Image (tube, helix red, strand yellow):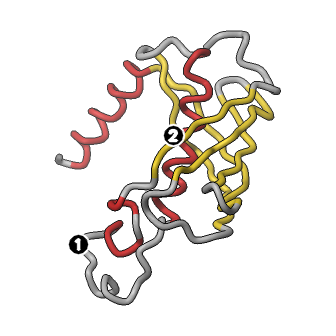
Amino acid sequence: MSPELKPGIRFEWQTVVPEASVVPRLFGQHTEFANEMPAVLATGYMVGLMELACTQGIMPYVDWPNEQSLGVHVSFSHLAATPPGMTLTIRGEVIAVEGRRVRFRVEAWDGVDKISEGEHERAVITSEKFHVKLAEKKLRAGL
């Protein structure tokens, strides 16, 4: 992790909301609400996009792919509904770097409304160590 990764770093990332991200399609195996739920960006998918924006924001400061980051905490509001096809603009700022933990303040806009705001934390990990631990866990779980 680069010593240049410090509070104050700002980033912006854009993406189009895909059809697959809407509430009725998010959990395809759970169809009990599919017909009743609105076809708008699902909160769970939105959280993933917010995490992805933060990942993109710190990519210049990690030794990819030897170092990667994993989400360890999210606290986002979901303020407005967004239909698929709209472009999201996600803006963030690094607000703290403590060891390998990086905290962000993040907002998302859909071109009409602010749809989300909050904080997120990621841990910068060493890929090799992580995959060794994951393999051990799979073995213990019988997978």
Up/down of 18 relative to 102, above or below: below
Q: Nearer the viewer, residue 80 or 143?
A: 80
Q: Which residue is mark 2?
A: 52
Q: Residue at point 37% right, 18% down?
A: 128
Secondary structure state at the residue bearing disc 2: helix
Residue type at mark 2: give it.
Leu
Which residue shows up at 39% across the image and 61% down it? 21
* Figure quadrant of residue 113: bottom right
User: Residue 77's spot in the image, x, y percent?
Assistant: 68, 64
Is 9 positioned to the left or the right of 35 in the image?
right
Q: Which residue is mark 1?
A: 29
Eye-nearest disc, 2 or 1: 2
Nearest the eye: 119 or 15:
15
Q: Position of residue 52 (x, y in %)?
A: 51, 40
| Residue 42 locus on image (x, y percent) | 47, 67
Q: Which is nearer the eye, 19 or 119?
A: 19
Query: Based on the displayed image, in which of its 4 quarters is residue 135 positioned?
Result: top left
Q: Earlier in the sequence, mark 2 or mark 1?
A: 1
Q: Residues within 10 Å of mark 1 (few under 14, many from 20)?
A: few
Tell me the SS state at disc 1.
Answer: loop
